[in-house]
Amino acid sequence: MVVNRDSLFDVRALVRRGLRPNSLAAFAFAILCVAAATLLRLAVEFIAPGSAAFATYYPVILIVTLVGDVAAGAVAMVLSVGVGWWAFLLPRFQWNHLSTQQLVTICLFVFASSLIIWIAAQYRRVVQRLEEEEAYRKVVVDERGHRVKNKLATIYAILRHELRGHGDIWDSVSGRLRALSTADDFLVNSDGKGIDLRQILEMELEPYGSRRIILSGEPVLLYSKVPTVLALVFHELATNAAKYGALSVPDGRLSISWRTSGDHIAVDWIESGGPAVAAPKKRSFGSNLIERSLDAFKGSAKIEFTPSGVICRMAIPKPSAAQANAGARESQPA
């Protein structure tokens, strides 16, 4: 059997957005659902005569209210009371005088159904409000992303003009600006689904080729501002490795591995086969950027200058379950 995915998405959209309150479609939907519940109740009657008269109508009232709002839910409740009284309360198929037990049964059904309608209506309003907020957030994020790109382009042009006589400074500044711009583009295009740690590394290390670089680790999705900060940190490490470290010579090697450790992700940046390195006498802006950027996210980074090459060990905060669930929901087609 072939299932049309587009039709499934239409059904999901109908359930999420609902029908227009007090419309003919909402009332028709209520009547259709009550008819389906009645057929199901008749089938149950053949299998187990004398079962609870209104058992199949409870979920119908919930579904109708979620899709058609309060008025449709009330119509479904009234129809359910009438059909259940006429068809399933003894003597069946006639408007008999109700016994005390039957009257209590109907009153309990009306009370429970009214409570279901109220709760479902509140839930429907919350979902609609969230839909509106999500649509507004997307517009704001897209607009802000556009403005940030324009500002970065303006800053890039100004700095290039002002630093035209200082090539070394311009190379350092322009590289960081490009890293920021690329990471921001990556975040906007990911649409909330998160960015894999390997993708960030491949993005920053692409100019140096893959022959001398080894990446190893399980898939790890990162969200929020952490990917942007990591892009800057990896860009700084890669730039230093290309100027003074393992990536500055043909035989140099760079190995980057990561693993989950408790509530953090441990990342090891290990250079080997390059020129001999020694700890600088004065800490540079780049070293401070690497070791302090993750502090705000309860992470850490530590640079070691060993005889075989630079080693940087990082601890990145593991994404929370709420972030992962939000990313999974946003990655589903709407």
Image: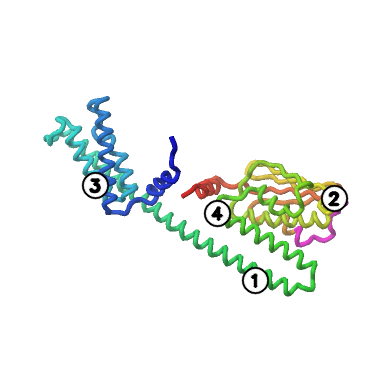
Q: Residue furthest right?
A: 276
Secondary structure of residue under mark 3: helix
- Eye-nearest disc, 3 or 4: 4
Q: Amino acid at mark 4?
A: Asp
Q: Earlier in the sequence, mark 2 or mark 1?
A: 1
Badge 2 amino acid: Pro
Query: Marks 3 and 4, how far apart in space?
Result: 41 Å
Amino acid at circle 3: Val
Q: Reading the chain from its start, which is encountered first: label 3 or label 4?
A: 3
Q: Residue 154, which numbered label?
A: 1
Indicate the quadrant where residue 151 lies. bottom right
Mark 3, residue position: 75
Query: Percent x, y for residue 331?
Result: 52, 48
Q: 314 and 79: which one is in front? A: 79
Q: Which label number is shown at residue 191?
A: 4
| Nearer the observer, 143 or 307 | 143
Label 1 – label 3 distance at C-alpha: 61 Å
The Cα atoms of the two marked residues, 2 and 4, are separated by 39 Å
Task: Answer with left or right where residue 28 lies relative to residue 187.
Answer: left
Tag 1 near tag 4, CB within 8 Å:
no
Q: CA distance from mark 2 to mark 1?
A: 37 Å
Q: Specify few, some or many for label 1: CA neighbours under 10 Å numbering under 14, 14-19, or 20 or more.
A: few
Q: Along the polypeptide, which appears first: circle 2 or circle 3?
A: 3
State the CA–CA distance, disc 1 to disc 4: 25 Å
Q: Is residue 276 magenta?
A: yes
- Identify the magenta region: 275-287
- Residue 299 covered by magenta stretch: no
Helix, strand or loop for disc 4:
loop
